[in-house]
Each structure stands twice: as structure tokens, then as C-alpha cells.
Image (cartoon, grey):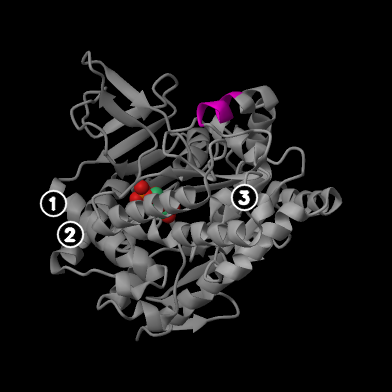
């Protein structure tokens, strides 16, 4: 058995991701400050890589001059406990423009979310994407040994596996996890490089998706290539004399830690946080937590709330909606427009219904600590998770994990990957404001017994398949039958 618990584990991980787990910056006094991972994927994987004492290859998005070792590219992290090597890949501005803002986020992101009209193609995006993928691939190969499992994250790296495969030491293996949806061939073929992208991913030994539909769509795409043979039932692709396993491995969250943290955020702490944002903690609270992105459907959510307050005036003054937002990719005009649309929609509804002592929608744009965020989840009566399309949506799972009193209601879009397993959520179609408004009304009117029944069931789903289980399942697919990767107690 191969375990990550065992200090003498035979295998070590080389994680490749666009975002880095630790950022190095200069403070105003010239000293180097290291920013810890705050959330999401990087925070979740950091303990796993610490355990294997492996390597992590990522875009050096911090200050390129703020280095703490002699070797500009490699730094030992965490800073106070030096468990693994962070190998940073430095990119020129034009590279960031073509690879990150360009091909990754103006082409692949909208394409995979089935928003073909939003795809913006410039010829140099592709060339830059390819060369940056080669740089990451070379950096990964530098760190890999015959005992390594190279674990590539997401859509930023369709072509890196090809570079890695060419020089991968014997005995090492490669797995890629695709965190966003994978569309049908009819959508994916819209980009001229569709076949090359699929071929790049097929250089891995294992390709993982959150849910069956994305896996099936990918297999359909793989079947279009000349030199492949696809066995859909077995979930494998035969190519170049190799067998690539293609599977669905739905990601989980660190449910125990979220619950423990939420538990510490008592009513007093909540009243304090609510006070800071002028939220009345004595009325109902609905929460939405999103990175500002056109896929998240925030304006449609606000339309639904408007309709809800219009049709159910008894809830005016009795429900506050808290929209917590974070920003990224803001250099892309579509993201600036998305941010403006959210602001405008909130203003419209607040102008229409707001009174002296009640603000219908409170927009929290500030950074919240994890404790505050999990506290907000715990004390929110309902959560509105209504993306137009979403690979999984971790917020849905985090909200559930934080419901330590089992009394909140999750409203979840049928277009989020998480909807596959969170079947006791109240299902919404974000494209139907009437249905959405009615679902809000039903959720707020639900009996305590019904709320408890649904939330207990959701909580068991989220606890019984957590982050560690996801890592273990995915990595076990990379080792020979009968062996196992187990990750336990990574807190
Ligand atoms: C999605 C992607 C991640 C990405 C995150 C934040 O969840 O799957 O790979 O890191 O969005 O986006 P950003 O562009 O800020 O990294």
C-alpha cells in the first residue's frame, strides 16, 4: 500500500497549477512577506503536498525580486516549516496576457462553460499558451523523479502534459484534473485547435473530471481524433500504445475543519460581523458567495430576488440578501462589465424596496477571513448558489459543511456540477426568475423538521466524501491495481 501518511512513501507529488500556494511580496519596509494560501484549491492541496514533501510548480505571481533563497526559482515552503519546494515559473507581461488573460480565460473558460459567443480569439493567444505550457512542462520535468506522480491542475495546461511526457522518467506517472465543465464535441470543436488540446490532455495517464457528463463529453471529443480508440464503458482511451483512464472524481471540501471553524463563530461573533455591514442579525439572511464572473449568474439572482419581494411583500424588511464578492481577471473587459452589472442590479433593487431601517441587499466586497466566511455561512438561513454553468461549485459544499445546527436551506442551480450529489438541495433554474423567486419563498417558509431532514442528508454527503477522499481516489487511479494512495488527517 502506498500511503501519504507514511513518511517513507515511495511516491512523491509534483503539483502543477497556475496559482501558487504561497506568494512572496515586499513589505513597505523592504522585508519579504509570505502570504499564506487563503482558500480554494491551493489551500486544500497544500497539506497534501506537505505530507509527501513533494514539489509544487506555479506561476510566480508575487514580486519576482522577493526571493528568500539563492535560487531565484525555488523556495522552501511553508516559510516556518520548509516541507516542500515551490518552483515558480516567472512570466513576462506579454506571456501573462496571451496565456492567462488570453487563451485560458478568453477562449477556454467561456468555451467550456458553453458560452461560445463570449470566446474572443487573437492569433497570438495560442502561440503564447503553447510556449508557456512548454515552460511549465519543463519546470515539472526538472522536479520529477521515477517516484513522482505529476499532478496537473485545470485548463491552463492542456499542452504541458505533452512536454512532460517526452522527458518523464520511467516509473513516474501523470494525472490531470479538469476543474471546470467539459462541453460536447459540437461546442468544443468551435476552436480551431480542438484536436491538439484533446491530444495534449491524452498525454496524461489519468484525466479526471467532477461528474460523469463532463467525462462522457471528453470521451466523445477523444473519439474524434484519428489515432484514438475509445472504450466508453471502461472509460479509457487507447492512444500511442498507451491507455489513458478518463474518470469522474467529484471534488470534496474539508468538511470537518469547516464545521469546527463555523462552530467557533457564535451568535456574538455573528452579531458583531453583521453590525459591521449594517445587516440586521434578527431577521432572515440569504447569502451568495462568488468570484465576480459572468458564469455565476449574479444579475439573474438579483432579478429573482426583486421578483420575490414584488410578489411577496410580506418579506420586505424580513430578509436581507448578503452578496459576498471577490474579484479576479479584472483586466478582461467582460469581467469589468460583469462587476458593473452586479453593482447596478443591487442599486436598482435597493432603490426600489429599501427603507430607512432595511437595506434589501448588502454587498460585501471586502476580504473576509475564513472564520468570518464560515461564520456567515453558518448564520445564513438560506444560500443562493445559482451559476449559469459551473464545474462543481465549492460554495455549495462549504455552506452545507458550515451548517452545524442543520437548519439552513441550500438553493442550488441544476447547472452546477455539485447538483449531481447534493440532491436534497432546493433545485433552481437560474434562467427562470419566476421559479427562482418561488423557490426562495418556499425555502423561507419550510418547516424546521423539513429543513433539518434535508440538511442532515446534505451534510452526510459532504462529510462522507471530503477533500481527502477526493485526493485519495484520484491518485489511486494513477497506481497499479491493488495499490492505494491514502491521505488521512491532513489538517
Ligand atoms: C476557477 C478555476 C481555478 C481558478 C479559479 C480562480 O475555479 O477552476 O483554476 O484558480 O477559478 O480564478 P483565477 O483566474 O483568479 O485563478
- Confirm if mark 1 falls within 8 A of ligand 1: no
Q: Are marks 2 and 1 in contact (CB under 8 Å)?
A: yes
User: How far from the left and from the top, in percent, is residue 226?
Assistant: 34, 86
Query: 402 or 99, which lies in front?
Result: 402
User: How far from the left and from the top, in percent, is residue 401?
Assistant: 67, 43
| Residue 247 lies in the magenta-colored region | no
Most extreme residue toward the top is 29
* Rendered position, 313 above or below 205: above
Residue range in magenta is 272-277
Give the residue displayed 15% in from the left and 46% down from the top: 93
User: Counting residues from the N terminus, which is met first, the one under dot 3 or under dot 2?
Assistant: 2
Query: 380 or 6, which lies in front?
Result: 380
Q: Is residue 235 left or right of residue 439?
A: left
Which residue corresponds to mark 3?
383
Look at the magenta stretch and give its main secondary structure: helix
Which quadrant is home to the C terminus? Answer: top right
Q: Tell me the mark number nearer the camera, choosing from 2 and 1.
A: 1
Q: Secondary structure at mark 2?
A: helix
Q: Residues within 10 Å of mark 2 (few under 14, many from 20)?
A: many
Label annotation for residue 94: 1
Which residue corresponds to mark 2?
128
Q: Secondary structure at mark 1?
A: helix
Query: 430 or 129, which lies in front?
Result: 430
Amino acid at each position: 500500500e502506498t500511503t501519504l501518511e507514511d513518511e517513507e512513501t515511495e511516491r512523491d507529488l509534483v503539483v502543477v497549477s497556475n496559482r501558487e500556494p504561497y506568494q512572496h511580496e515586499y513589505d513597505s519596509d523592504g522585508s519579504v512577506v509570505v502570504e499564506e494560501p487563503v482558500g480554494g484549491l491551493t489551500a486544500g492541496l497544500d497539506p497534501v503536498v506537505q505530507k509527501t514533501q513533494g514539489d509544487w510548480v506555479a506561476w510566480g505571481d508575487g514580486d519576482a525580486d522577493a526571493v528568500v533563497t539563492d535560487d531565484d526559482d525555488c523556495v522552501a515552503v511553508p516559510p516556518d516549516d520548509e516541507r516542500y519546494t515551490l518552483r515558480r515559473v516567472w512570466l513576462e507581461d506579454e506571456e501573462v496576457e496571451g496565456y492567462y488573460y488570453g487563451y485560458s480565460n478568453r477562449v477556454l473558460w467561456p468555451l467550456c462553460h458553453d458560452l461560445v459567443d463570449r470566446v474572443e480569439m487573437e492569433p497570438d493567444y495560442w502561440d503564447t499558451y503553447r510556449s508557456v505550457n512548454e515552460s511549465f512542462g519543463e519546470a515539472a520535468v526538472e522536479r520529477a523523479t521515477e517516484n513522482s506522480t505529476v499532478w496537473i491542475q485545470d485548463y491552463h495546461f492542456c499542452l504541458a502534459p505533452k512536454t512532460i511526457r517526452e522527458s518523464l522518467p520511467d516509473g513516474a506517472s501523470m494525472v490531470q484534473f479538469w476543474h471546470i465543465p467539459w462541453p460536447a464535441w459540437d461546442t468544443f470543436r468551435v476552436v480551431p485547435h480542438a484536436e491538439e488540446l484533446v491530444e495534449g490532455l491524452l498525454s496524461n495517464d489519468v484525466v479526471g473530471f467532477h461528474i460523469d457528463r463532463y467525462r462522457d463529453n471528453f470521451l466523445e471529443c477523444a473519439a474524434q481524433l484519428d489515432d484514438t480508440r475509445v472504450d466508453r464503458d471502461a472509460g479509457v482511451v487507447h492512444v500511442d500504445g498507451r491507455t489513458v483512464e478518463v474518470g469522474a472524481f467529484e471534488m470534496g471540501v474539508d468538511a470537518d475543519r469547516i464545521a469546527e471553524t463555523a462552530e467557533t463563530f457564535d451568535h456574538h461573533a455573528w452579531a458583531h460581523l453583521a453590525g459591521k455591514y449594517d445587516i440586521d442579525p434578527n431577521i432572515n439572511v440569504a447569502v451568495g458567495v462568488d468570484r465576480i464572473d459572468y458564469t455565476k449568474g449574479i444579475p439573474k439572482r438579483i432579478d429573482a430576488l426583486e421578483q420575490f419581494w414584488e410578489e411577496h411583500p410580506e418579506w420586505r424588511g424580513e430578509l436581507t440578501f448578503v452578496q459576498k464578492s471577490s474579484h479576479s481577471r479584472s483586466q478582461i473587459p467582460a469581467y469589468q462589465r460583469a462587476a458593473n452589472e452586479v453593482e447596478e442590479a443591487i442599486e436598482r433593487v435597493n432603490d426600489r424596496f429599501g427603507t430607512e431601517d432595511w437595506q434589501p441587499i448588502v454587498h460585501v466586497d471586502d476580504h473576509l477571513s475564513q472564520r468570518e466566511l464560515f461564520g456567515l455561512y453558518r448564520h445564513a438561513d438560506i444560500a443562493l448558489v445559482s451559476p449559469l454553468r459551473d464545474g462543481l461549485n465549492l460554495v455549495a459544499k462549504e455552506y452545507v459543511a458550515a451548517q452545524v445546527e442543520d437548519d439552513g436551506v441550500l438553493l442550488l442551480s441544476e447547472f452546477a456540477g455539485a447538483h449531481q450529489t447534493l440532491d436534497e438541495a432546493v433545485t433552481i433554474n437560474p434562467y427562470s426568475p419566476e421559479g427562482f423567486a418561488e423557490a426562495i419563498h418556499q425555502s423561507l417558509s419550510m418547516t424546521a423538521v423539513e429543513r433539518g431532514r434535508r440538511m442532515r442528508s446534505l451534510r452526510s454527503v459532504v462529510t462522507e466524501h471530503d477533500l481527502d477522499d477526493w485526493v485519495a481516489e484520484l491518485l489511486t487511479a494513477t497506481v497499479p491495481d491493488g495499490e492505494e494512495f491514502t491521505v488521512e488527517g491532513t489538517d
